[in-house]
Amino acid sequence: MLNVPTDDALCRQAEQLGEQLRECKATLVTAESCTGGWVGKILTDIAGSSQWYDRGFITYTNQAKQDLLGVPAEILQAHGAVSEATARAMVEGALIHSQAQVALGITGIAGPGGGSIDKPVGLVCFAWANRAGEVVSEKQRFAGSREAVRRQAALHALQGVLPLLS
């Protein structure tokens, strides 16, 4: 059975992250592609989130990734939009273009179309970075509908910030 996060589960994770960010006196910036701003929406559903959420970039196209985040065209050409290299460039650009101390980035193929043998539907690449220079990236493959993939990606992205705060 597919374990798709509910709205309550996403909210609980966002609240936990918000508490940690507040305790660390840190702020977060998000750079989203396949989730289309869903992580930012989850975070801003919490009253008082402006204390720890700086801003979000929705960079759905390659051009938007270049224009708003400074993702190099060479990375997009060599690795594609859905790659750890692109996710890493997204978080690095998000930190450069914000006041935040921590960043998360998401790029993937939510489906139902758009996949390939090398990059199937459900493939999502993540990156997390902080101002201390730590950058972590990984890819995951999620199952289910477009919404299920996006929900799973949003939860995973939120969870990935916590280790950078400790």
Image: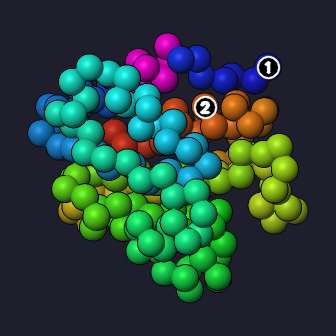
Q: Is residue 152 at all visible to an observer of this figure?
A: yes
From the top left corner, tell me how far across and down residue 77 is, in percent: 64, 82
Indicate the amino acid at tag 2. Answer: Arg
Name the residue nearer the viewer: 81 or 41: 41
Mark 2–mark 1 Cα distance, whole angstroms, equals: 15 Å
Measured from the top left, where is residue 127 in percent x and y? 46, 56
- Whole-percent x, y for residue 107 in the image: 58, 55
User: Residue reaching furthest top?
Assistant: 8
Does label 2 or label 1 sit earlier along the sequence? 1
Which residue position holds label 2?
Answer: 151
Main SS class of the magenta portion in the image? helix
Name the side, left or right, on which 141 lies relative to 60. Answer: right
- Foreground of the two, 124 or 41: 41
Q: Mark 1, residues whose alpha carbon is within 10 Å: few (<14), some, or many (≥20)?
A: few
Classify mark 2: helix, strand or loop: helix
Q: How many marks?
A: 2
Compared with 105, 97 (above or below) is below
Residue at (61% x, 33% y) in the render? 152
Asked if residue 11 lies in the magenta stretch, the reply is yes
Residue 9 vs 109, above or below: the answer is above
Q: Which residues are magenta?
A: 8-15
Q: Is residue 166 visible?
A: no
Q: Which residue is mark 1?
A: 1
Q: Residue at x 70, y 30 (%)?
A: 148
Where the N terminus falls, by quadrant? Answer: top right
Q: Is residue 73 left or right of residue 24?
A: right
